């Protein structure tokens, strides 16, 4: 698939409005398009209140131009007894059709995470892996609680190691 004509930044050149990363930081404008899958051995945990849903040191980050990284955890590191299928599906131009997951104790509250059970060939490495919405549950990377990517639609995990601006912020609809 190709990006629409209005998408001119693909991680090759940082736009003039992008923030300059400081020491130990990354610019989301240096991430590629199409996205890359990058292993991340830091401890990652996902909590719903006092219940730990997932814990891993085998996560991967999906890095896409202008988006906060999305962390995916292997199925073996997720307590699936805490999850039930949620309503809805969506299509990612890169990864394919997403399935959604809700808390087993509160399915009426909607999706807290998602997975790609039959992704496109380029994303076969994350088949069945789960990611979670930092706006709905506590997503912790290396001891830092991730903040949700702005805008309410995307599931990126904003941490102190990345700078934007991020897709989803006000005025970014043309990206």
Image: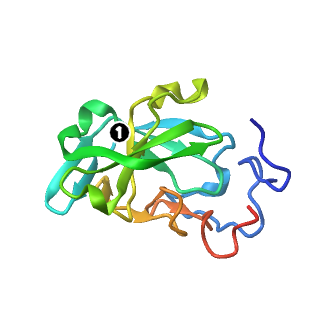
- Disc count in the image? 1
Residue sitting at 76 percent across and 65 percent down?
A: 174
Residue sitting at 53 percent across and 69 percent down?
A: 150
Check disc 1 and report the residue beneath it.
73
Q: Quadrant of residue 172?
A: bottom right
**Color encoding of the figure:** rainbow
| Relative horizontal placement of residue 26, taking residue 6 as reference (left or right) | left
Q: Quadrant of the N terminus?
A: top right
* Rendered position, 32 above or below 157: above
| Relative horizontal placement of residue 16, taking residue 127 as reference (left or right) | right
| Relative horizontal placement of residue 9, taking residue 122 as reference (left or right) | right
Q: Where is residue 122 in the image (x, y as percent from the top left)?
A: 60, 27
Q: Position of residue 53 (x, y in %)?
A: 22, 48
Q: Position of residue 154 (x, y in %)?
A: 53, 58
Is 56 or 126 nearer to us in this picture?
Answer: 126
Q: Where is residue 37 in the image (x, y as percent from the top left)?
A: 53, 36
List the single residue furthest toward the bottom.
Answer: 170
Q: Quadrant of residue 136?
A: bottom left
- Classify mark 1: helix, strand or loop: loop
């Amino acid at each position: 698939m190709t990006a629409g004509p209005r998408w001119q930044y693909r991680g090759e050149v940082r736009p003039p409005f992008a923030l300059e990363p400081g020491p130990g930081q990354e610019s989301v404008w240096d991430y590629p398009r199409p996205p890359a899958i990058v292993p991340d051995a830091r401890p990652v945990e996902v909590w719903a209140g006092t219940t730990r849903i997932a814990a891993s040191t085998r996560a991967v980050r999906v890095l896409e131009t202008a988006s906060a990284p999305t962390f995916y955890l292997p199925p073996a590191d997720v307590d699936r007894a805490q999850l039930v299928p949620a309503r809805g599906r969506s299509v990612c131009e890169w990864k394919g059709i997403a399935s959604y997951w809700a808390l087993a104790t509160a399915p009426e509250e909607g999706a807290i995470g998602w997975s790609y059970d039959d992704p496109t060939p380029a994303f076969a490495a994350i088949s069945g892996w789960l990611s979670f919405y930092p706006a709905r549950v506590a997503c912790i990377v290396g001891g830092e609680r991730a903040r949700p990517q702005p805008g309410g639609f995307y599931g990126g995990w904003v941490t102190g190691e990345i700078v934007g601006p991020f897709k989803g912020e006000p005025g970014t609809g043309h990206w």
